[in-house]
Amino acid sequence: MYASLKSLFSWPLSLDHLRWLSLLLCSCSTLGNALIYCLDRPLPLILLLLNIAALTCIWVQYGYSRKSIRFQPQELAERLLEVKENERHRLSRELHDDIGQLLTAAKLQTDWLKRRLPDDLQDSCAVLGTTLEETLAKVRDVSAILNPRQLASLGLEASLRAHLLKTLENTSVHWSLECRQRLSGIPEEMAVAAFRITQEAVTNMLRHAQAKNLLVRIQRLPEGLSLFISDDGQGFAPASDPGALGQRGMAGMQERISQLGGLLQVTSELNQGTQIEALFPWAPRTLERASTNKVSH
């Protein structure tokens, strides 16, 4: 008997087990109560204990259910950001490896045909080759935008400088990147977010602002990593809810900064340019490491 009770209490109770046990106890309790009512007899102790056991199971199941749906918003935001970046990396890899290789093969085939076609088709073949080269360059650019591989190897400052140089080289925009401190040791998710926000801000400026000058400033502050982007373009009217008004670029910036617990402030007026200020707070482990390094020095 003791062994049977011991095995019963050692039986692992999962949520499904609790549901079945609660159903069984409630059914037995209901039948017992109905029988006592029909026989017009006093409530026996065993039936009272059965009711208590059923109620206990229901409360335990309720507690398990609350724990199962409880989540930390910061953890969920970090997971969403990780999934989004992984999907960007996958798309970048497919563009670079699959589509890029196919376009390269088509370009080689075009070169082979050009050497064998008659003179009256040489011009058309040259146009086709040029189109393939431009398409291949665009695919590589999109792949680099989706997955800035240089972040891991070059760091945030060098990656931003390389992106600005490549994006603005054929434009009339005068740009400068100010960074007077070493940016080593910045968490990867923070560096990616700062790069993406700058990327989106530059894209919006080229599409809509018609700006002549661009300033990007990034610096380490005691409270976090500060990013400041300013242009002298046409400006616009910032919305409190940019996603609802179709401002997808601004909505994406707000989403990224919110997922890291930071602050984003956009100041803009018509014909007065645009200023974007983002502050990424240091994670507790980063602050702890910085304090430890300060003490050791």
Image (spheres, rainbow, N blue to C red):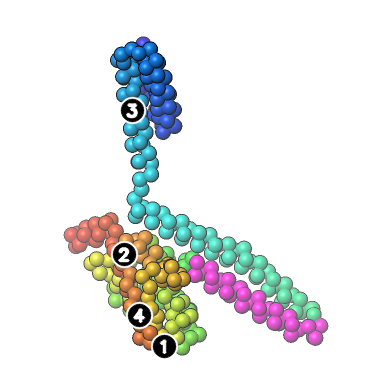
User: Which-is-in-front pick, marks 2 and 4?
Assistant: 4
Q: Which residue is mark 1?
A: 212
Mark 2 or mark 1, which has the lower sequence index? 1
Which label lies toward us, 3 or 1? 3
Q: Which mark is residue 268?
A: 4
- Mark 2 or 3 closer to N-term? 3
Look at mark 2 in the image and give the residue it sits on.
Answer: 262
Left or right of 204: which side holds 287? Answer: left
Marks 3/1: CA–CA distance: 72 Å
Give neighbour class at mark 2: few <14, some 14-19, many 20+ (Cα, 10 Å). some
Few, some or many residues within 10 Å of mark 1 (<14, 14–19, 20+):
some
What segment is highlighted magenta in the picture? 118-146
Q: Quadrant of residue 239?
A: bottom left
* Residue 171 rendering spot, x and y as whole percentages: 48, 86
- Amino acid type, callout 4: Ser
Frontmost of labels 4 and 3 is: 3
Q: CA distance from mark 2 to mark 3?
A: 45 Å
Q: Residue 15: x and y, percent?
A: 41, 33
Magenta region includes residue 205: no
Mark 1: secondary structure:
loop
Quadrant housing the C terminus: bottom left
Whether residues under marks 4 and 1 lie with C-beta atoms below 8 angstroms apart, the answer is no
Between the residue at mark 4 and the residue at mark 3, the CA separation in whole angstroms equals 60 Å
- The front one of 261 and 28 is 28
| Dot 3 or dot 1, earlier in sequence | 3
The residue labelled by disc 3 is 55
Asked where in the image residue 267 lies, by quadrant, the reply is bottom left
Which label's residue is closer to the chain start, 2 or 4? 2
